[in-house]
Image: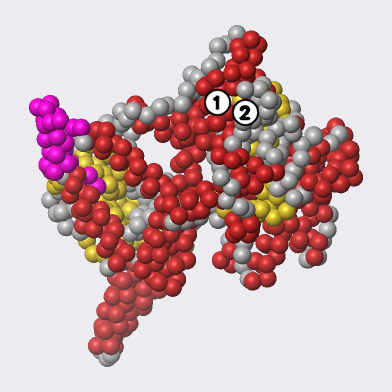
Amino acid sequence: MNLSEALDAALPEIPRTRLSRKNPPRVDPDLIIREDVTDGEPIVSVYQRSTANLLRLKPTQWQLAQLFDGMRSYEEIAAAFEAETGIPLSPEEVRTFAENMDEGGFWYQNPQEKNIAMNEKLAAQRSRRAQSHSSFNVAHISFSAWDPDRYLTRLDEKVGKYVYNRWMVLAAVLLFLFEAVVFTAKWNVFGPDIPIYYDFSKKTFSDLVEFWLLLFAIGFVHESAHGLTCKHYGGEVHNMGLMFLYFTPCFFVDVTESWVSASRMQRMATIIAGIWVEMILCGAATIVWTNTQPGGWAHDFCYKLILLTGLAVVVINLNPLIKLDGYYLFAEWVRVPDLKERSTTFLTGWVQRHIFRLPVDVPVVSRRRAPLFFFYALASGLYSYLLLLVFIRFSYNVFSHWFAELALVPAALLGFVMFRSRLRSLRSFARDFYRTKIAAFRLTPSRAALAVALLALLFVPIVRERENAYFVIEPRETHQVHAGVPGKVVAVYVKEGDPVRSGQVIARLQSMNAASASEEAASLVASSQARVVNAELEHSGLGGALAAQQAARDSSATAREEGAHLAVVAPAAGVVATEDPQSLLNRDVTTGEPLLTIVDPTQLVARLFVPVSEMDRVRVGDSVSLQLPFQFSEIHGLLGTMEGSAVPLPAGVIANEGYKGIALPAFYTTRIPVEAKEGEVRPGLSGEAKIFGARHSLAYRLAILFANVVRTHFW
């Protein structure tokens, strides 16, 4: 039997009429009061320790509440209030005020009334549970553990006078400067290690145990710092425990009393105390890490402590878009309590009132605060939904290891559970919108014309397919000049961009083998001729001498041919396209090695690179527009037949993103003839292209998008 069941069984069913008050209630004598200013208006912050309620009342409301002493009647309270303030108030208005305050448990209750109130509270909780299938809130799950007030009181007595003085603050600031210097100098070490340390897929079981033990220990110290600061500045702390914020475990401590027991600067100190003590831990760990030898236990432990308490955690805690330390610090800085709730209520009310024209009340916000509320609600909402979507995507990746593509089912169910309250709110909004706008809708000629226009916009094929592609300008014909013989380049007569004609000598080689072969061939020719003369004089061996002479002549012809290859000539007219031909000087080359490239700049084509993902949306014959960089002109052509298989995009066509998670797709290629003015395009020019396909309606495109998603996940 849990506590609720025990109280429900023990508390008697006492009739309400028997315990109804004869006189109005009275103010709780244990209230903590603080006068403050919010949004430029004075308020009275009232904290009730017995219920942990923090109320913010207008000065006139607090003045009226103080008149409730349990003895005066409603008529006497109304008369006394009018006498003090000059504001007329009827007894019924006083009664309504008392009833409204009683709903929040504001008034003092004797023990018997507390029993009745507890019984009614439990009944209300049972009723809410019966109406709601689940009270589970994935965004905020908390488990209250213990009352730390006595522990924090002793801690403040021991260390409070040392911690909260200007010299300790100055020492901490110097320590933070030391941390900043080390982080800057060692960022090449810390930067890559931070994501690795938080990558749970690569941690062993012992690593996970160590990580969570460290996290819980640091979390306890973090929240103790909040509580100690609240206690030091006069507040009490009676609630501390564990919570899951978007499934991330963290400790919490209730320091609400600091909003009435401390000044604004003391409240900000209470908020920042957790990050402050983590930075001190990080600084101490940095000192040990920088002064110990690698490999030791202390060195390794302190490095992990740095990664766990350093820059990454500080940035996360200082994020003002979710309810962590940064949010409360920001709310206190702009002097707007409950900023997230108030801004969200304002934005949703404004949208429903001014965009959907629903009869809802928009909270009154000053012009000075309206932009803050609007942009904060928008940014905070988008960030919160992004966190939920990231978690759903993470769960899908985990489920996919066991269920493959069927992991979409549990991930979708998890998403439904997480967004159930949002879907319920959306359903209520849709119902109100239908009742207010749709059910009372009357068809008029102007509305009929608008409906026809919307249907035409949705179903008429007016949107032309526009697919992205890339292009590189290339010459239609490329002539590669190769080395005819092995040798050394001794002269280059052209530069990049120089025009050449067919047969022009553009470089020269030097070959010791060719020179010696030529000399040897000349010697063989001379000796073979002498042998023929001797054979003719002696009238014997003439046939052999003639054969030797022919062989010598063949060898000489070969030597001359090789010598001719020492002069490198242009095979066709064109322009030298090789970058820095002079770099070939004094290089040793082999037979067939490429030396220079000659292209015809008047005959160009555009090699078009079409992403694989867009191949099903383009057709041969579609119009293509090449957008020349740094020019207003475009080159138009028709899409040709794709060539071969998919290829990667050449380097330099687009800027390198540098993201490991963003990979370029493969591309299919085709060639488009280029007809442009001289000098407008040149080989090597690259840029973006647009392929204009058939016209389709918006409905068709949405259907194709949905079909692709289904096909990707199920087929």
Residue 65 seen: yes
Which residues, given as a range, are shown in magenta?
440-467
In the image, what residue occupies the spot 74% across and 34% down?
30
Q: What residue does disc 1 label?
A: 95
- The crowd level at tag 2 (other Cα within 10 Å; few <14, some 14-19, many 20+) is some
Q: Position of residue 509 (x, y in %)?
A: 41, 59
The answer to which image quadrant residue 690 occupies is top left
Foreground pick, 684 / 184: 184
- State whether residue 185 is above or below residue 530: above
**Horizontal side, residue 635 vs residue 582: left or right:** left
Residue 582 seen: no
Q: Position of residue 97 (x, y in %)?
A: 55, 26
The answer to which image quadrant residue 265 occupies is top right
Foreground pick, 457 / 139: 139
Task: Identify the amino acid type marked 1.
Answer: Arg
**Horizontal side, residue 710 vs residue 113: left or right:** left
Q: Position of residue 369 (x, y in %)?
A: 52, 23
Answer whether labels 1 and 2 touch (C-beta < 8 Å): yes
Foreground pick, 680 / 33: 33
In the image, what residue occupies the spot 45% across and 64% down?
397
- State whether residue 254 is above or below residue 67: below
Residue farthest left in this picture: 445
Label 1, label 2: how far apart the Cα atoms are: 8 Å
Q: Is residue 449 magenta?
A: yes
Task: Identify the amino acid type marked 2.
Answer: Pro
Q: Which mark is residue 24?
A: 2
In the image, what residue occupies the spot 77% across and 49% down?
148
- What SS does tag 1 mark? helix
Q: Position of residue 273 (x, y in %)?
A: 74, 40
